[in-house]
Amino acid sequence: MSRKPEGNLRRGWTTGACATAATKAAYTALLTGVFPDPVAIRLPRGETPSFALARARLDGDSATAGIVKDAGDDPDVTHQALVLAKVRAAPPGSGLRFRAGPGVGTVTKPGLPVPPGEPAINPVPRQMMREAVAEVAAAAGASGDVEVEISIPGGAELAAKTWNPRLGILGGLSILGTTGIVVPFSCSAWIHSIHRGIDVARATGQSHVAGCTGSTSEAAVQKLYGLPDGAMLDMGDFAGGLLKYLRRHPLPRLTIGGGFAKITKLAMGFLDLHSGRSQVDFAWLAERVQELGGSEGLLREVRDANTAMQVLTLALQARLPLADAVAEAARGTAQKIAAPETGIDVLIFDRQGKLVGRSYG
């Protein structure tokens, strides 16, 4: 995860906002022959930003407009992606129909906000586009019966860097956004993916899911339990985002896996495990070592340690089950947040993926 820079950060626009602006511009041109540039739209909270067109093409029975997404200062995978909307007239009375063009995914699994077979365009962007089409139609005295095809050149390659393949969204990216605005480093897209992963797991009958802090622990947990890709929730640093959603949408079993430092922070009660937002307390670790019967010399070494891994190495050399104690405390934190009917296991791995601590619920 990228580190948040210092100073005031610039907001950006979601793919949903860009798709809405492109749709409004294309439909306007289809009816009038003229592309508005810039094109203004209304966001769900009432803001009215304007977008410059990067593409404008009129082909008789269709019009295409494109917006280059500006995610502001957020490290968004779709920053600078071209979002295209191609609008065609549809049969009278058919309303607005959405299609997934190149680079936009199609939903193939249940549990997501739109059903299988539909383009991966979430409900809020769909509503924004419906309202924009209705506004243009009312101004021109048209019916608003159109087909809107959203595409993102290169979107299939970008989607490989997202959760979409695991969620059963195939062929490209999702058109996302609930406010139309990207708040830098809010990590809303990551947490959104965790929630959708839980939704899909519930809808596809998964009884056991896993949330891990990184790729090493994820690979180890998946191999240990033989879990399918659809059961692996990309928790990363967002333990709180995972556990709070499971409280409202429980599953029978959750395994949390991670390295010693990240799981120590969960054990201490932190729900955001990012190094910029929580730190390992070596005095806290020393208390755990003392409870396990560690010597005074070892306690001094733990308090003066530079890294959590150094503490783990000292405990292993002293044959103290510190990683087990930390896993147990982390499970206690997690169980307080998640639904009581969710059984939780916590596993701690070293950097090579070897299991060094565990607590089973």
Image (tube, rainbow, N blue to C red):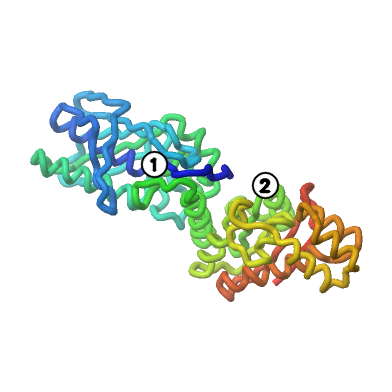
Q: 116 or 239, which is in the foreground?
A: 239
For disc 2, the marked residue is 215
| Distance of label 1 from label 2 (alpha carbons) | 29 Å
Note whether 31 is above or below 46 in the view shown.
above
Q: Amino acid at mark 1?
A: Gly
**Element class at badge 2:** helix
Res. 12 mark: 1
Q: 46 or 230, which is in the foreground?
A: 46
- In the shown orientation, is residue 242 left or right of residue 100? right
First in sequence: mark 1 vs mark 2: 1
The residue that appears at 16% across and 44% down in the rendered structure is 135
For the residue carrying disc 1, how many other residues have a C-alpha within 10 Å: few (<14), some (14-19), or many (20+)? many
- Pick out the residue farthest to the left: 141
Q: Is label 1 or label 2 in front?
A: 1
- In the shown orientation, is residue 157 left or right of residue 56? right
The residue that appears at 17% across and 27% down in the rendered structure is 34
In the image, residue 261 lies at what x, y percent? 72, 56
